[in-house]
Image: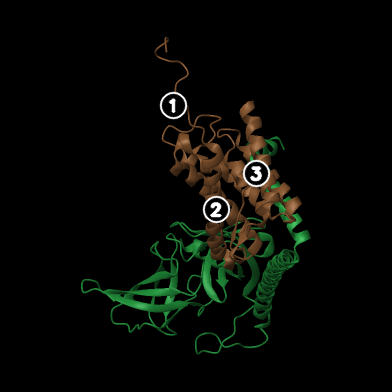
Chain colours: A green, B brown
Amino acid sequence: MRNLFNLIIRNHRLVLFCLFEIIAFNWLVNTHSIHSSRMSSVGIKCANSWTDILGQIHTYNSVKDQNIALNQENSRLRTELQRLKKYVPIKQLSYINKELDTSIWVSTAAEIVRTSYHTSNNVLIANKGKLDGVVRGSGMLDKGHLAGKVIKVTDHEALVFPVANKHIEWSVRIGNEGAVGRLVWDGGDLTIAHVVDIAKSSLVLPGDEVYTTGFQGVFPSDILVGEVVKVAVTEADDFKTVIVNLGVDYSSIRFVEFLTDKRILNSDSLINSVR
Amino acid sequence: MNGVFKSISVLIITILLQILVFRFGIFAGGKAIIFFHLYGLVLLPIGWHKTTYLFFGTITGAIVDLVLLGGGLHMASGAILGLMLPHISEAIAPRDGFQKGHVICALKDGWMRFLSYCFLISTVYSFGLFTIEGGRLGLILFALLKAILSGSLTVILMGLAQGLFGLKRKNKKSKVSAYPWS
């Protein structure tokens, strides 16, 4: 308040000028009909513009709420779909008709609450954890695309390594029955990853789709990863590098689903016993 | 103090002249109008507190409005002029600036400076008045034209007034003689 008074005192000449002009204009509007009508039309225009702006803000908020509700419903429906898959055989992305066995794979809808995608160690935090059925090693899908793997879980949160993380690799297949290789991210563009260790003799063309192999136990096979954009071959190397455009967009990721293999503990103990 | 009273008296006289005589000074279908009361504002001492000019400008405009039924037009333009007046005097000031309390005069400051000051004051005032009267941005150029015409007309009158009443030449014959015996 004191600062306000100081400001008024500092600019008292301008304040007085505005006051005099207001008095003069008020006098003018009450005396001359042309000015009165002009002021009225300006007032109506201002009021209309203000109402229009308020309406637009209201519409935006309404659309935003609807969008959140639709995304949540979408996530819920995807979960429901996974549950129903055990009753109705569904066509997977490959040409083979097979069903995703929901007695093995459990789907859990979740929301990403924190992200970091500007470093080489990008991580995501989801709002579902151990108590919701998400365990270490669960896979994460975004709109049906491979998106990440759960590294740590608390009761209600899960730490996820996305594909765009330099410290994780993925087993992928080029095409439905193509060569198998390792999908790695080089720390550059978030939408681009590389498939390495592909034999030079294998036929890979831009436009081919890349799927999960299912060897890692994180995902079932034939989950879409992305699309081949370029194939890099060097004379000195026996392998070719396939550049893949990832299907998941990390800059807008929000509602996701986790796939958890119920046998994961058994599989892990089996592997550990061999080691 | 005498200078202050003198300036206010001159302002009152010019307002009376505007109300009684120059109110009929409307030419070219209202494109050129005489605002002689501005001469009183021209002759206000320079260097007063800036707010004082704002008060003088507004009150002068309000008085003219009250008598000539201007409906606030003169008051609004008077307030604009009152705000601008210190800046106008700064703009036309010589390199060393005006002394505090200096009243602009053609004899001391030269006709060029005096007429420029008058022209700027009357044009700013007229421009404000015609712009508010027009009430539309589309008429602003027309308002400027009218302001220049009215300003020029008012400047001619101010020049005449200054020539007739403002110049007090010193008597060439000195009262103290160099020859005491003469």
Residue located at (78% from left, 59% from top): A30
The mark that comes first in sequence, 2 or 1, is 2
The mark that comes first in sequence, 3 or 2, is 3
Residue located at (21% from left, 74% from top): A235
| Residue extending farthest left | A236
Same chain for the residues at labels 2 and 1, yes or no?
yes
- Disc 3 designates what residue? B14
Q: Nearer the viewer, residue B4 or B92?
A: B4
Report if the CB atoms under discs 3 and 1 are less than 8 Å apart. no
Q: Is residue A74 visible in the rendered structure shown here?
A: yes
* Numbered disc 3: secondary structure: helix
Q: Amino acid at mark 3?
A: Thr
Q: Residue A227, image x and y in percent?
A: 43, 79
Left or right, residue A194 beside residue A13:
left
Q: Amino acid at mark 2?
A: Thr
Figure quadrant of the C terminus of chain B: top left
Q: Nearer the viewer, residue A262 or B10?
A: B10
Q: Residue A111, image x and y in percent?
A: 63, 65
The chain holding disc 1 is B
The mark that comes first in sequence, 3 or 1, is 3
Instruction: Report the disc number at residue A136.
Output: none
Question: Which quarter of the picture shows residue A67?
Answer: bottom right
Q: Residue B179, image x and y in percent?
A: 39, 12
- Disc 1 designates what residue? B172
Residue located at (48% from left, 39% from top): B106
Characterize the local packing of mark 2: few (<14), some (14-19) or many (20 or more) Cα atoms within 10 angstroms.
many
| Residue extending farthest front | B182
